[in-house]
Amino acid sequence: MKKSGTLLVATAAMASMATYAAAQPIVDGVVTEGDYGAPLWVNDTNPTGFGNNLDPSVGCADGSEIDALYAVIADNGLGDMWLYIGITGNLESNFNKLELFIDTTEGVGQNILPAINPDVDFGALQRMGDDGSGNGLAFDALFTANAYFTMTNGNCDGEFTEVYANFADLDNQLGYYLGMTSNGIGFLEGGDNPFGIEATIDNSNIDGIDDLVADYSAALAVTTGIEIAIPMAALGDPTDDLLLCAFINGGGHDWISSQVVGGGLWGADNLAEPRTTNFAALYGNQYVTVANGTPRTGAFIIHVGPLYAGQNGQFGVEGAAANEMVYWAYSLRGLGSQFVPPLNVILDLHKPAEVGHTRADANGHANLELKIPGPAAGRTIWFQGCHFEAKTNAVAVSVQ
């Protein structure tokens, strides 16, 4: 692989400004900047692989998409702080799932979903977790899940749809069926909801992105979708900034769509099997950051975009030491252990080779563009970045 002189800006989740809503949003499925402030992420990269909704009714949708994500921590009007989340778009009323994982505490929680977790929504976490072979949904390097929320809807008659929600405290291994509601109504009934979590949907959107194009302006213009309100007490009253990972999944929690909040750049291709999905291997961060007081510290991590044989691939690192020379290594043989004496670092690759080096900027970012050889098609390649006495995580990427 040959190094190019082109420098590409790595996509990274940016912490939102530490602002709070003047008044709490009303959980009715209508999402406005007046309630939340500017969106934390707008989808301009991934058309939907789960169908474009053409049904304008507030209840039913015949496709699923995420156009943007908004979030704010605000007083609920009674002196309690709540996390309010607005996800514009649609959730098909065929019991597709919105999956939401929340990282409340830096370095504590689940980076890969294990086999053992609370049983909510008929084994949702077990279906995405380790099946005993050492797999399981893997998050980005800095993301460790502490809480989980999932929502679905179906049995729609046009005007109304049935909405069901579940929540799990992953740290304390507690799970709750929160109950059900309908579109436009945030209060959940008939379940075990000790914290009073609210959720609903307005499925009327027929604009935004579609199954061919993800346009920023069109996505930003959508103002209806899913709203969720979770008391901070339900999350253990954390003081760290929160990280949110959200995506649309199949009805059995078994087929991740192309609609994942954050980095992306894989078009409308669905990610498919959750147990073999590794967000760390995708370009950018598949999460957003919600300001909550204590900023997250940066870690030295690598991002690798989708790789296509015969085309240029994009690589980026963040968290490097300022102005350090970053070396990019790869292996065709998988993970291992290789000491590199000049850098005094042990790489996590088996017989690695260098493909280039670039100097990090003052913010610790370094980027590289590499031509992927044609014969690499169908191969899995492992990548890692490093500089003197420091290394990134290692990621495996399949060349298409």
Image: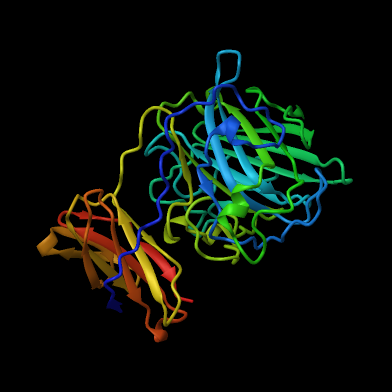
> For this rendering, which residue is in front, 121 or 207?
207
Q: In which quarter of the image is residue 305?
A: bottom left
Lateral position of residue 150 relative to residue 12, left or right? right
Residue lying farthest to the left in this orientation = 342
- At 74% from the left and 27% from the top, the residue drawn is 187
* Spot occupied by residue 21 in the image (x, y as percentages of width and height): 54, 26
Determine if residue 127 is in view.
no
> For this rendering, which residue is in front, 386 or 70?
70
* Display colour scheme: rainbow
- At 61% from the left and 64% from the top, the residue drawn is 213
Lateral position of residue 59 relative to residue 170, left or right? right
Determine if residue 105 is in view.
yes
166 to 395, vertically: above or below = above
- At 35% from the left and 64% from the top, the residue drawn is 315
* Spot occupied by residue 147 in the image (x, y as percentages of width and height): 53, 36
382 to 19, vertically: above or below = below
Figure label count: 0
Lateral position of residue 49 relative to residue 378, left or right? right
* Spot occupied by residue 256 in the image (x, y as percentages of width and height): 61, 57
* Spot occupied by residue 64 in the image (x, y as percentages of width and height): 70, 54
> For this rendering, which residue is in front, 256 or 291?
291
Residue lying farthest to the right in this orientation = 157
**Dividing the image into 4 quarters, which one contains the N terminus?**
bottom left
Residue lying farthest to the bottom in this orientation = 375
